[in-house]
Amino acid sequence: MGVAVSGWLLAQTVSQLGQLGVVSGTALAVTLARRLQLGDPDGRLRHALSHFPVPAVAKRVLAAYFSPVPKAESAAYRLTPMPVLKPGGAFLDLTVLANFAEVFLAKEGHRGVVGVNLLEKIQLPTLPSLFGAMLAGVDYVLMGAGIPRAIPGALDRLARGEVAELKIDVHGAAADEEFHSTFDPRAFMGEVPLPELNRPYFLGIVGSATLAMTLAKKSSGRVDGFVVEGDTAGGHNAPPRGPMQLSDQGEPVYGPRDVPDLEKIRALGLPFWLAGSYGRPGRLAEALALGAAGIQVGTAFAFCEESGISPELKERAIALSQAGAAKVFTDPVASPTGFPFKVVQLEGTISQAADYERRNRICDLGYLRHLYRRPDGTVGYRCPSEPVEDYVSKGGAIEDTVGRKCVCNGLPATVGLGQVRAETEFELPLLTAGNDVSDIAQFLAPGRMSYRAQDVIRILLGKEATGPAPESGAEQSAPAASTTAASQSATAVNQG
């Protein structure tokens, strides 16, 4: 679901309808800072910030980014600090506060469950992001795009108010050399007493039984279940097993080895949800028959009225779906992560290569930079989407830069928060969705060109949406066979 597509409004709506609403935790510091610069017209963000338990942090962030007069359309956004191994106070303030605000707003006014989705590939903001979400009472943490074995233990330590630590991937590090990021909850709180924190449930997003077994048996703490995601899901996909082979269209070729072995996953005894092209009537029943607890749905919710995608992009995607012309391309090289990435083919977006090649390469957000070891033993940062000469000068291979896109800047543009490079130059949107984008028109009522989250839930459950979640008990219930899950940053659906 990219950046801010599954924001607090969508997650709140889905949760109120009795499902698990999941907010995307990716680059929330950027979206908070930019929305404050737009004046926070409805006051919701400032409302959330007024409830943050460390008022001094909220005051500093507001002083740095809030403008009572929205910035001019032609003016650039003020940049946020880039993630680094040892971040400064400004980055920590903004990251913790942004995750708190998103989860706080998603949970406000009801007793339903809310989750946050993070990417293992974006390691440096992870600990402060988790802490901010936990301060707001997040119920679930979902994480994929890697092997997040250390996250369950980090959740345990943060819940106890202890210093948490994550091993960070650094290219070129020696076999006996390790680099870590750390976060100290009590140091962050300063003189403010640390509130009692609940340890959220942890769901690993996996593409194979091997990965599920690794997480279940070798994680640093309790794993509560899995989202088993196929290669038709939106966003980042797990690479095919074995050597990369491309189709005639240039997409990765997936085969029988890439189909998750559900029998082995069932044998682990933990609940799991199926994802990837499950946003269609009847797929929930199929998943339950296979032993799943439910389904994860993202693409269907990504284009509903409550999602963060710009209305104009939603309308055009829905129109393509109606015409039978909506398509995604699984780009093997677009993402700096090295994982295949689903890109909706839509004119005026990054899917059009000729338009994108005119963009001047720049790396000014830095969430997908790779850490590497310099000859002197210090850590450097590089991204295959940055200027080619810069990447090569840092020891990167020039072939790694071919076809790369700036995902960090493209995704915020999809939700109307793209950076302004000049008065007539704006970042192009990067729109991601699963193969189910071809079917989103099924949620339209006759005579309408938009649909709501409740329409998705009603159709997927095969009945009328049930209204607000129960007043008690729901937010602390363990993962159960009656719960269907949310998408890779989107939502979940309850059966029953």
Image (tube, grey):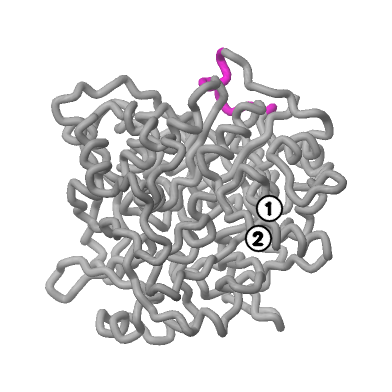
Secondary structure type for disc 1: loop
Residue at left offset 35%, top offset 54%: 123
The foreground one among 52 and 148 is 52
The percent position of residue 131, horizontal first and vertical second, equals 33, 36
Residue found 35% across the figure and 84% down from its top:
388
Q: Is residue 412 left or right of residue 238?
A: left
Q: Exactly how many numbered labels are in the figure?
A: 2
Q: Is residue 436 left or right of residue 351?
A: right
Graded by Cα atoms within 10 Å as few (under 14), some (14 to 19) or many (20 or more), the crowding at tag 1 reads many
In this rendering, the answer to whether 264 lies above or below 428 is: above
Q: Identify whether 371 is placed above or below 6.
A: below
Is 488 part of what is drawn in magenta?
Answer: no
Q: Secondary structure at mark 2?
A: loop
- Please name the predominant secondary structure of the magenta segment in the image: loop
Distance from disc 2 to disc 1, alpha carbons, whole Å, reads 7 Å
Q: Amino acid at mark 2?
A: Asp
Can residue 127 be seen in the rendering of this structure?
no
Q: Nearer the viewer, residue 34 or 291?
A: 34
> For mark 1, what is the residue?
276
Dots 2, 1 in contact, CB < 8 A: yes
Expressed as whole percent of the image width and height from the top left, the position of residue 435 reads 71, 60
- Residue 231 — which label? 2
- Determine the residue positioned at 45% across, 57% down: 417
**Residue 489 against residue 81 in the figure, above or below:** above
- Where does residue 46 sit, x and y in percent of width and height? 36, 35
Range shown magenta: 472-482
Amino acid type shown at disc 1: Gly
Q: Which of the pair 258/404 is nearer the observer?
A: 404
